[in-house]
Amino acid sequence: MSKQNTIIGQNIATIRKHWQLSQEKLSQLIHSSRGMVLHYESGRTTPDDVVLSSLATLSRIPAHPLTTTLIYPTLLLM
């Protein structure tokens, strides 16, 4: 598990929890499976560019910071 995967996973979990989404609901919004969301959040798998783009749109944060910097709920817009 790379440091980048860990950052991405933590960011995905932060976004999901901030928007009060289940892993299942998030998976539907990003056109993935619940199992893949679990793998992303745990850092086992890196999301592809399509998933990162969907997450960036959902969170209103550009994709690059999602992959390099830990985000905090206070940075997410309601």
Image (cartoon, helix red, strand yellow):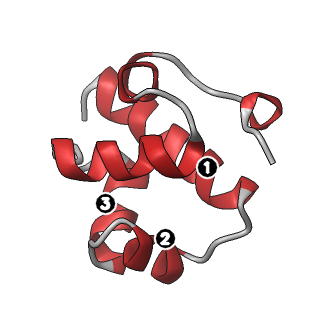
Residue at screen point 37% across, 29% down: 63
Quarter holding the N terminus? Answer: top left
Residue at screen point 72% across, 37% down: 76
Q: Looking at the picture, tell me which residue is in the foreground, 20 or 35.
A: 20
- Give amino acid for label 2: Leu
Q: Secondary structure at mark 3?
A: helix
Q: Earlier in the sequence, mark 3 or mark 2?
A: 2
Residue at screen point 34% across, 22% down: 3
- Give amino acid for label 3: His
Q: What is the number of the mark on residue 26?
A: 2
- Image quadrant assignment for residue 66: top left
Q: Are marks 2 and 1 in contact (CB under 8 Å)?
A: yes
Badge 3 density bin: few <14, some 14–19, many ≥20, Cα 10 Å: some
Residue at screen point 39% across, 79% down: 28
- Image quadrant assignment for residue 60: top right
The residue indicated by pointer 3 is: 39
Relative to residue 39, is residue 70 drawn left or right?
A: right
Q: Secondary structure at mark 2?
A: helix
Q: Secondary structure at mark 1?
A: helix
Between disc 1 and disc 3, the foreground one is 1
Give me the C-alpha separation between circle 3 and circle 2.
Answer: 13 Å
Residue 4 drawn at (x, y percent): 32, 24
The residue indicated by pointer 1 is: 15
Question: Is residue 63 shown above or below 45?
Answer: above
